[in-house]
Image (spheres, grey):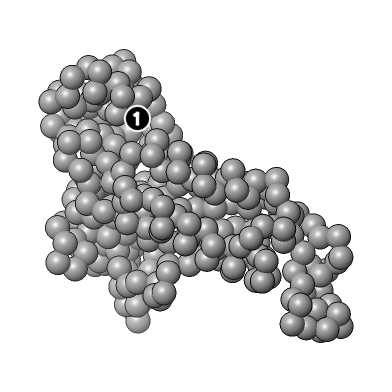
Amino acid sequence: MKAHLTRRYMFSASHRLHSDQMSDEQNRATYGKCNNPYGHGHNYMVEVTVSGSVDQQTGMVCNLVDLDGFVHDNILERYDHQNLNLLPDFASDVPTTENLCISIYEIVKRGFKHAHLDKVRIEETMMNSFEYWGEQDVPEF
Amino acid sequence: MVYLTRKAEFSASHYYHNPAFTPEENARLFGKCNNPNGHGHNYTLEVTVKGAVDPRSGFVVDLKQLKDVMSREVLDALDHRFLNKEVSEFLTQIPTTENLAIAIWRRLAPKLVSAQLHRVRVYETPDLFVDVYGEEGAEA
């Protein structure tokens, strides 16, 4: 039977939502206080879900040490206590949590080979969350 | 289709060890989870069932019945137990959260009468959980 394993991680970062393709007025109208010029921060909670059949020898979908190590080295080290607007990911894209979700999904998908990546889900605050399953809709289970 | 989730908690101890591996392999692979004296968790179980809403009762499932099945089939067997030594599935399997979720699915699925089991989610800690949806598609 296939199992889907989810691990939660935290990091803190700042950002400002501002699009160079809009006027200052349009930016303020679109992003409200998220457009304040000096930026603001969040404690982001990232959920990474991987899946696969359970290895008979280990009882695991993948070793958590491998997943934790990958996420620590490639996600937390990259984003924690950073200004997202200054990272290459967001040189041309606005650092919304939608785009952050896609960036993190792509990094894990490209680099983590121990299990299949289902999705990345991010809570920006307790009141909002975003998830990305790659180029597909949420599957029916 | 409406999906209904019921939560329950249980506490149990376990350790990870495969007798086919050398002590060094076990220690390397399972780290501190390999301590033979075991360690424990407060597990949270979420059982999600799905079904059409019965037009007479307004229920997807009788919650009392669901609670009774969860108590009898899962909690009575696992709560305050040493999984490796006291729960039949784990005499031969490693009691990882993955295997625990699968074992709970297999205990519950045949016992639910009016609603169909959709998902079993087991939290080992608030930061780690496993979902199973039964046999998905052609995969076993």
Question: Residue at 25% across / 66% down in the picture?
Answer: B116
Residue A39 shows up from this direction: yes
Which image quadrant is residue B56 in?
bottom left
- The front one of A126 and A67 is A67
Q: Is residue A128 visible?
A: no
Residue under label 1, please give it.
Answer: B12
Residue B135 is situated, as x and y percent measured from the top left of the image, at 19, 61
Q: From the top left corner, tell me how far across and down residue A56 is, in percent.
A: 16, 40
The chain identifier of the residue carrying mark 1 reads: B
Q: Position of residue A34 (x, y in %)?
A: 79, 67
Mark 1: secondary structure:
strand
Quadrant hosting residue B9? top left
- Which residue is depicted at the point 61% across and 62% down? A89
Q: Which of these two is toward me, A58 or B73?
A: A58
Q: Which quarter of the figure has residue A95?
A: bottom right
Residue A12 appears left or right of B88:
right
Q: Is residue A140 above or below residue A103?
A: below
Q: Position of residue B104 (x, y in %)?
A: 25, 47
Q: Amino acid at mark 1?
A: Ala
Label 1 crowd (10 A; few <14 / some 14-19 / many >=20): some
Task: Please give the name of the residue rendered at 63% of the width and 50% of the height, measured from the top-left corner.
Answer: A79
Q: Quadrant of the C terminus of chain A?
A: bottom left
Q: Is residue B14 above or below residue A48?
A: above
Image quarter hosting the N terminus of chain A: bottom left
How many numbered callouts? 1
Residue for point 74% across, 76% down: A19
Looking at the picture, tell me which residue is in the foreground, A18 or B95: A18
